[in-house]
Each structure stands twice: as C-alpha cells, then as structure tokens.
Amino acid sequence: MNKICVYAICKNEMKFVDKWLDNMSEADYIVVLDTGSTDGTYEKLLNDKRVTKVEQKTYDFFRFDVARNDSMKLVPEDANILVCTDFDELFNKGWADIVRINWKENTTRGFYDYAWSHNEIGEPKDMFKYDKMHDRNYHWIFPVHEVLYPNDGVKEIGINFQGKILLEHFQDTSKPRKFYFDLLELACKENPEDTHVRMLLAREYLLKKDNKKGLEEFLKVLKMPDINSPNKRLVLLNSILQVAFIYEAEKNFDEAIWYCQEFIKEDPTYREPYFLMGEMYNLMKMYTLAEAIVKTGFEYGKQHFDWVERGNTYLGWGYDLLGVAQFQLKKYEEASTNMQIAVKHEPNDIRLLKNYIKCLEKLKK
C-alpha cells in the first residue's frame, strides 16, 4: 500500500505553520527539520499531533542541499512516496489521494503543476512543471536552488499529475535572500563546468539590479562547453532570452531583437521572444510589425510549463501589446477587445486602464 510522507525544512515559519499542516495532513506522515527557529515554530511543531516527527538542527554553515538531505532521514521506513514542500506552499485539496491511487510500484518520480507567484487578483503566474515528489532513491545537490538527483544506477520512471495536482507558492517576501549570492558562488566553485548554476548566478545579479554584470555572466553561460547538451536545453533558451531582456532594458533594440531571433531559431514554440519583439516594435512606433509579431506568438507559442516562460505571458502581456499596436493603427474595435482582456488580468494597472478608456472614447466618436 502506498504511503506518503511530506518532508520539509523550516526556520521561523509561525505565520504559515497551521495552514501548511492542515494542507499537508492529507499525507500519511509529516516530518520537519527545523534549522534554528526562534519564533516558536519548533515548539509548535513538537506539540502538534499532525506532525509525525520533528527535530532541530543548526548548522555552522548552512546550505540547502545538506539540510534537505538531513530532513529526508526523518522519513518513516514504510513511506514509499516522499514529497518535499516549503511552509509557504499549499496543494489543491485531494492531492494525496490522487497520488496514492495512481503511483505504481516502479514509479520513481511525480510531476505536477507549480505556481511560483500570483497576480493581484490571485491568478497563478510563473507556472511550471514541478518534480519534488519521488521515491527513496534520490538526493539533493547544490548549496542553493537545490535540485533532486537520482542515485547512481536509478532509472527514472515518472508519472504526470499535471492538470490534477497544483502546488501554489505564497512567497514570504520579508525574508532576506542576500545569502543566496554567496551560496551560488560556492555552487559555481564546486561545479565550474555546470551551466545551470552559472545561469542562476547570472540571474542573481539581475535581482541585485546589476544588469551589466548579469549580462556579462549570461554571455559567459552561452559560451560554456555543455550549453548545447540535451539536458541543458532550458539553460540555453533561458540565457538567450535573459540577454534579450537585458538589451531591451538598455534600449539596445538591435541586439535584443537579434537574440530573440536566435531564440526562435532554437525553438519557435515559445511566446516570449515574439512578445518581447512586439514590445520593442511598439516602443519604436513600428506598430504594423508589432501587431504581426505578437499575433505570430499567439499562433505558434504553446505553454511549456517551464522556468523559461515569463509570469504574465499567458495572462495579459500579449493582449496589452496587441491593444497598443492596434490603437495606433486605428483598429479601435480590435484594440478595445484586447485591452479589455489585459485589464481583466491587471485591473489596478493605471496605464492599462487609461489606454482602455482612451480606446473606448475613440469608439464613441
């Protein structure tokens, strides 16, 4: 009989703990490794009957992969399905029964939908396929942005729960992430030939608002020996796209468009490069081109559910771009339809509202 154990690490999670325990209690077991809470989280977990086992362990030097691997040691021996979550994440109701019923004897890994963020009206953004559901033959690697890796000799056999199971992330933005940078530098030192960790370091520079250094690092990634390996396909695509976004931010539209075109050569089935070019053509007042390229994105782009995709690509971004272009082309009826969709997704965006009102006024004349 399949038995599920949710395992987690935590530190100072009092504002999330009750909702998380309620949600994860659909599993057979819950185990937690507390890494040094001082707000009562550890004591709360110790005294809560929903928790199978909790231990506290502090580290002289903290790294996520070590803590995750230590937390797995708390999983009861009869649990054959392990699910790693964080305290700011919640599953849809009924998730555990879906897993129990469908998990086969030879299944090693489960895949499901993950919403990393939400827009202002609660619609999921940054949707991608998640993979932190597995059997016992895995371990964690990398000091930060850690990933599950199969043990030697394990042949992965996955089961897809997408469309049935959704894990939503409700990020605690009050927590500092400045130590991520040091851990990413360590990951690069430990894995100097790995484009994945180098790409994450480049992204961290962008989060620090250092576009110059971020661009430099992404260009290094694109020259690394394993960038064209099949298992680094997403690293390649994401790095090309990030370079395009950086050049656009610097108003270097020629370079940005060139990288968008390079992306499309690699894979024409993502909306992002088309929409980004449409955004730039609007800025350059080349509205016919903008309309055409955005429509091409809608026609050829399909949702991949991976981290190459932007958060608003499948919400209002494309409709906003079309609305702007069509308004300038005096296609007011088409523009109003697209602007209305964009406003629906971002009802408090002043720019979108003003554009829509202006378009409606044109229709009345």
Image (spheres, rainbow, N blue to C red):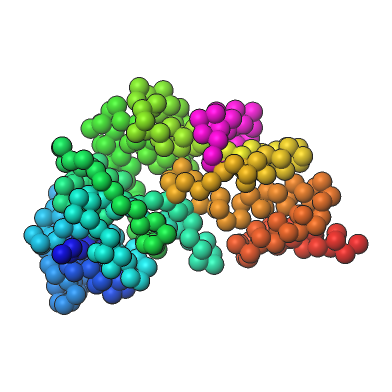
Left of 207 or right of it: where is 249?
Answer: right
Q: Position of residue 145 (x, y in %)?
A: 31, 46
Q: Residue at x 54, y 67 (%)?
A: 121
Instruction: Determine if the magenta segment contains residue 263.
Output: yes
Percent x, y of residue 55: 12, 63
Task: Looking at this view, name the residue that lies furthest to the right.
Answer: 365
Q: Position of residue 304 (x, y in %)?
A: 47, 46
> Is there any visible trace of residue 65 in the rendered image?
no
Q: Quadrant of the N terminus?
A: bottom left
Q: Residue furthest left?
A: 77
At a point 51% along the width and 34% down the height, the residue shown is 267
Q: How many marks?
A: 0
Q: What type of secondary structure mainly makes up the magenta span?
A: helix
Q: Residue at x 66, y 53 (%)?
A: 319
Query: Which part of the image, by quadrant, shows the C terminus?
Result: bottom right
Q: Note whether residue 165 is visible.
A: yes
Side (left or right) of 168 relative to 338: left
Q: At 72% across and 52% down in the image, what residue appears?
A: 323
Where is 67 relative to 361, above or below?
Answer: above
Residue 101 in percent (x, y) is at: 26, 64
Give the residues in magenta.
Answer: 247-271
Q: Is residue 257 magenta?
A: yes
Q: Quarter-wise, where is residue 190 in the image?
A: top left
